[in-house]
Amino acid sequence: MPDARLVDAKASFTDFANILDTRVLRALADLGFAKPTLVQSKAIPLALENKDILARARTGSGKTAAYCIPVVQKILNAKSPSQDGNSSSIRALILVPTRELSEQVSAHLRGLLTYCADEVSVCNVCSGTTNHLQRTLLSDKPDLVIATPSRALVLLRSKALSLASLDTLVIDEADLILSYGHDEDVRHIFGDNYLPKVFQSFLMSATMTEDVEALKGLTLRSPVILKLEEDEDEAANLTQYSVKCAEVDKFLLTYVILKLKLIKGKCILFVNDVERCYRLKLFLEQFSIKSCVLNSELPLNSRYHVVQEFNKGVYDYIIASDEGVGKSEQDEEDDVAEVEEEEEEEEFTSTQRDTNPTPTEEPEAGSSRKRKHPTAAPSDDAEASTSKQASKKRKRGHKDGDKEYGVSRGVDFVDVSCVINFDLPSSSRAYTHRVGRTARAGRTGMALSFVVPSEEWGKNKVVGRVESTKKDEKVFDRIEKEQAARGSKVKEYAFDMKMVEAFRYRMEDALRAVTRSSIKEARIKELKTEILNSDKLKVHFEDNPHDLEYLRHDKPLHPTRIQSHMKHIPKYLLPKIAAVQGEASSSTTDDPGARILNMLIRILHDLGLVHGNFEEDNVLRKFNQDGSSEYRVIDWLASYPHDTRRLERTDGDLDMVLSKKSYLVYKAYKLWHIENDVDVEFQPRMLPLPNGEWTLMLTDNASLWAETVKNFDEEEDSDDYSDDEGEDRSTVESRR
Ligand SMILES: Nc1ncnc2c1ncn2[C@@H]1O[C@H](COP(=O)(O)OP(=O)(O)OP(=O)(O)O)[C@@H](O)[C@H]1O
């Protein structure tokens, strides 16, 4: 459900019963769409009056349905018996900037068409199917085609796609479509006589940019402009922070944030290129922090699957790169700055200049009904500036990889708690879209951006010179200004650097292990795996969709040595548990609940004091990795009052008993871990030992537990609690 402030509280979809087909209304109800969002309630009736529409509404405001609903309805109207419109033709074209978005729009349309799929056919020509299949599908003249501009142009040129009967054209994410390098393609689509003279157009955009202005001139006639401005309150769901730090400190802070779970929930970490994706993934792997990568190199199916699974909650961390786009936008913003400078110079030298520029937002009612020809000569300064920038942009050409990849824009990531701009994007527009992946659908969210000060740039030998962060300060200035104009503030985040510093040694150790060759190796390995997943297994997964759950994208790549001790945070690095410090005073309390609680915290504390070699893998640390688990244990024990007696009884001999228990718990954990090669999410349980004591069990594996208990007698008298992984392994081997 989108943000309540974006929903039209006074309206309901049933209010549209006179203009929308009952099958569409039913599908909307199934999708859980009860009330339209503001952009939907405004756009749908106007669109069904055949008006051209330019809608500017913030990310996550429901723009997709705002155009999909009327487009579907128009097709149903056209095909209704009264219109005698059963002849097949392509009636609507939806242009999107990325293949990710084409998938998302298709999925939304599939939902909308649940009850009329026989009547309205849809073809997504970016879906990764073969050219041959696409041509066959298009020869059947689907009612609705979804494409990126470049894909559409290829098909138009080869005559596989004909738009002669087009009724509706939608350009979604209009502010992005040119920045994905589609500008030439768009100009050809509009300029090479592929489109009929009359059709209805929609331009949907999160921001109003010069690209949108350019498209507006190309495609809209007397449009209705829906501008759903954000006010301060609307932006309040998103809290934005920045940290000025050296390149290497980004790794340090990310390690601390993720390992200590300072952020709860799902997180997208944006980096600026593919290599950085793997560098960060391998770095986190050193600490057994699992993550998936998303970048333009990966096959479309894998990318799509990662997003789906992330949305379902299978993964917590995605490291995404949006390499191509920000660059061109940075150039564009730099160009604007350059052009502005040039103009300032001109202004300075020329007294002839018109000092009253025409207002940018004109009432549209009286404007010409003709669509502007794309090659028309620029008529004013603004267009001259635009064309200067456009020509600069064109000169730069495209990037390698899938230029139609893009996850920072438009993709509906669900329930993301935090966006970390590990690398600051290179434009303020890219920033807006990246942070728009959180605080969606009425939820709160946080964005944290690392900004490398110019005097720190290029100083670290291990991470080298990271070109993309060279202009961080300049870009950040723009970001701050743009956010301020939207009524939002990017606050400075103050980390407790004293606490963080303690982690530096480990961070540096991990960073050194992530060498260039290991990154290269990981990149190739991942690509191979994903291509295999994508192609060879595609058929299998189509037949057995449930098996997809076994296809994981967050497996460790392990091209570099993993140091097992890095997996855990040593006790001395952990923030102190407040209750332990206060135990003396609270132990005298009369409140039995508080006493139990206090004692348990003491026990957990003491569990951290097991003999020397256990330091690296002790149980308390494991608890602390999951910030809430000590409280889970406490909650659990509080609901078992009979344990209290036992614990009180053992209180006098606490150290001895707990050392033994710690050993068993540790042993169980180690065996489980080695056997399964997984990081277990522990659900602590209190279980009886053969000697009548109780201990914490950290695994649900019953046979493993039985094994541990069976060995208990043999080990009972042994003082050797040495941390010998070899011994653990052989125990596992012998059990096999
Ligand atoms: N009327 C509605 N009722 C309930 N949920 C809705 C409604 N409209 C849209 N949503 C949901 O809100 C989320 C955001 O919608 P959508 O992706 O269309 O936003 P958007 O404006 O296109 O955002 P962006 O600019 O980032 O692409 C989606 O999960 C969508 O299913």
Image (cartoon, grey):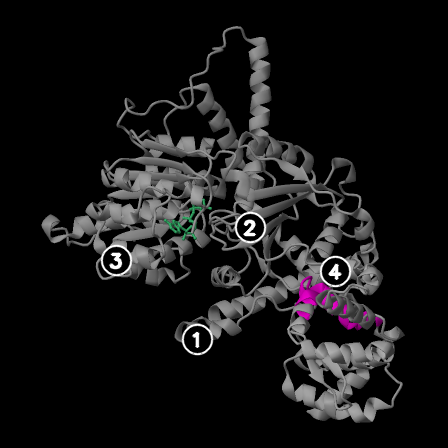
Upstream in the sequence, badge 1 or badge 2? Answer: 2
Disc 3 vs disc 1: Cβ atoms closer than 8 Å? no
Amino acid beneath label 2: Asp
Disc 4 vs disc 3: Cβ atoms closer than 8 Å? no
Q: Residue at x 34, y 46 (%)?
A: 36
Q: Is residue 629 left or right of residue 511?
A: left
Seen from the viewer's position, the closer of residues 27 and 481 is 27
SS of the residue under disc 2: loop
Above or below, comparing residue 545 to residue 459 in the picture: below
What segment is highlighted magenta in the picture? Answer: 615-633
Identify the disc placed on residue 540.
1
Q: Is the CB–ligand 1 distance for label 2 below 8 Å?
A: no
| Pair 3/1: label in front | 1
Identify the disc placed on residue 139.
3
Q: Which residue is mark 4?
A: 514
Amino acid beneath label 1: His
- Magenta stretch, main secondary structure, is helix
SS of the residue under disc 1: helix
